[in-house]
């Protein structure tokens, strides 16, 4: 992604398809955002951008990229993410592009719990927020995928 493309996305603000995060503290939190985008219509997760659109950058892109790998491993089925580091205003921003997945619903895997795959949490985007999907929404996502194939 080019700087001017990233700048345009940031100027557009957060939405159903764009989420800004200053930083993340856990792989699970990243996974929830990625799942929500994949289950809705895809989008961009920008790490190193404050909620108001201020570019703050990341302290360590290697550390953030490692956390993204941890997050990706928590998602079922697996997602094809495009991750890149874009230097803008002399700061590094991590851009994760999440496709609108044809393999919905994606769910959060929790290895520590004895849960069945269908009991795992799914998330969707509602406006600027990622929220847990209810059972009916999960059924709708699964039915939509079957209908399209």
Image (cartoon, grey):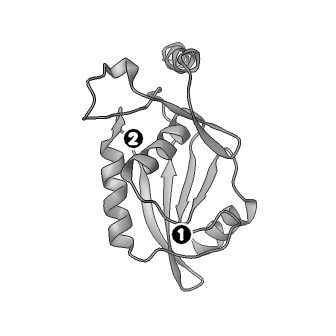
Residue 65, disc: none
Q: In which quadrant of the rendered view does residue 111 lie?
A: top left
Kindly identify the residue that appears in the image at 61 percent across and 54 percent down: 19
Image side of residue 147 versus residue 16, left or right: left
The 10 Å Cα crowd at callout 1, few under 14, some 14 to 19, many 20 or more, is many
Image side of residue 84 versus residue 116, left or right: right
Q: Which of marks 1 and 2 is nearer the N terminus?
A: 1
Residue underneath mark 1: 48
* SS class, disc 2: loop
Residue underneath mark 2: 79
Q: In which quadrant of the rendered view does residue 79 lie?
A: top left
Total residue callouts: 2
Image side of residue 28 versus residue 5, left or right: left
Q: Vertically, is 103 above or below 45?
A: above
Kindly identify the residue that appears in the image at 39 percent across and 72 percent down: 61
Q: Which of marks 1 and 2 is in front?
A: 1
**Residue 139 location in percent, x, y?**
52, 14
Q: Which residue extends farthest front?
A: 113
Q: Vertically, is 91 above or below 79?
A: below
**Residue 110 location in percent, x, y?**
31, 34
Kindly identify the residue that appears in the image at 57 percent across and 76 percent down: 56
3D distance between C-alphas at marks 1 and 2: 22 Å
**Residue 5 location in percent, x, y?**
64, 67
Q: Which residue extends farthest right?
A: 12
Query: 103 or 29, which is in the foreground?
Result: 29
**Residue 105 location in percent, x, y?**
47, 26
* SS class, disc 1: loop
Query: 84 or 64, which is in the foreground?
Result: 64
Kindly identify the residue that appears in the image at 48 percent across and 56 percent down: 96
Decide: marks 1, 2 in contact (CB < 8 A)? no
Q: Vertically, is 57 above or below 28?
A: below
């Amino acid at each position: 992604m080019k700087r001017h493309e990233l700048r345009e996305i940031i100027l557009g603000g957060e939405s159903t398809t764009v989420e800004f995060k200053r930083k993340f503290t856990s792989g699970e939190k990243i996974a929830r955002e990625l799942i929500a985008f994949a289950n809705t219509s895809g989008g961009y997760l920008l790490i190193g951008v404050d909620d108001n659109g201020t570019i703050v950058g990341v302290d360590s892109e290697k550390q953030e990229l490692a956390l993204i790998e941890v997050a990706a491993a928590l998602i079922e089925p697996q997602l094809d993410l495009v991750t890149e580091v874009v230097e803008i205003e002399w700061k590094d921003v991590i851009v994760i592009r999440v496709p609108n997945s044809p393999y919905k619903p994606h769910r959060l895997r929790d290895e520590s719990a004895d849960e069945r795959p269908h009991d795992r949490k799914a998330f969707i985007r509602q406006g600027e927020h990622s929220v847990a999907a209810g059972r009916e929404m999960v059924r709708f996502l699964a039915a939509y995928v079957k209908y399209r194939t």
